[in-house]
Image (cartoon, rainbow, N blue to C red):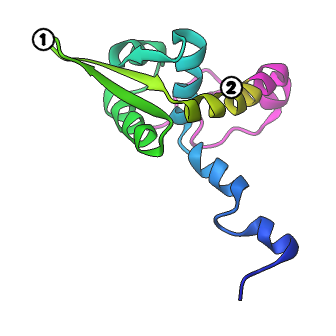
Amino acid sequence: MQATGPDQDWREDCAPRRVMELFSTKWTSMILHTLQARHAGAARTGVLQRSLPGISKKMLVQTLREMEASGLLTRHVERVVPPAVEYRLTPLGHRFVGLVDLVYGWGRDNADALDQLQERATSRRRGDGADPAP
């Protein structure tokens, strides 16, 4: 039996959960934001990696492939030696950039609230200046 009414809002495939699933990997939102804010919607792989401190080449490529499969960006290969690969936001990707910009703007405006959060064991941000545990 199909759930009706308010229960529909809590289904596993409801829109809010699908949005959160899309952004469950931190690099997806950061790549969308970086492509738009720093590179006018298109950039080569190496340029993107230099623009995203902390991302490994493996994680960047993996995330770019997932984003391409989702329809958020397209991959363009220039026939030069060595091949140059550029990633471009799709119209769908541009739609999601607006959401990312809202979240990033909120973060900038509410940094004090973020500073009040208790540190998580997996956090890279350490209040004591120590490096995170391996």
Q: Secondary structure at mark 1?
A: loop
Q: Which percent across, then down, holds residue 89?
A: 50, 26
User: Is 112 included in the stretch rendered in magenta?
Assistant: yes
- Where's the C terminus, which quadrant? top left
Q: Are marks 2 and 1 in contact (CB under 8 Å)?
A: no
- Magenta residues (range): 105-134
| Neighbourhood count class around disc 2 (C-alpha, 10 Å): few under 14, some 14–19, many 20 upward | few
Q: How many marks?
A: 2
- Asked where in the image residue 8 lies, by quadrant, the reply is bottom right
Left or right relative to 117: residue 76: left
Toward the left, the furthest residue is 81
Residue at image mark 1: 81
Q: Does residue 97 belong to the magenta stretch?
A: no
> Which quadrant of the figure has residue 14?
bottom right
Q: Which residue, given by chain and number where applicable, does mark 2 sit on?
A: 127
Residue at position x 56%, y 30% in the image: 91
Disc 2 to disc 1, how far (Cα)? 47 Å
Question: In the drawing, what numbered circle is on residue 93?
Answer: none
**Rendered residue at 64%/34% (across/down):** 96
- Say whether residue 124 is visible: no
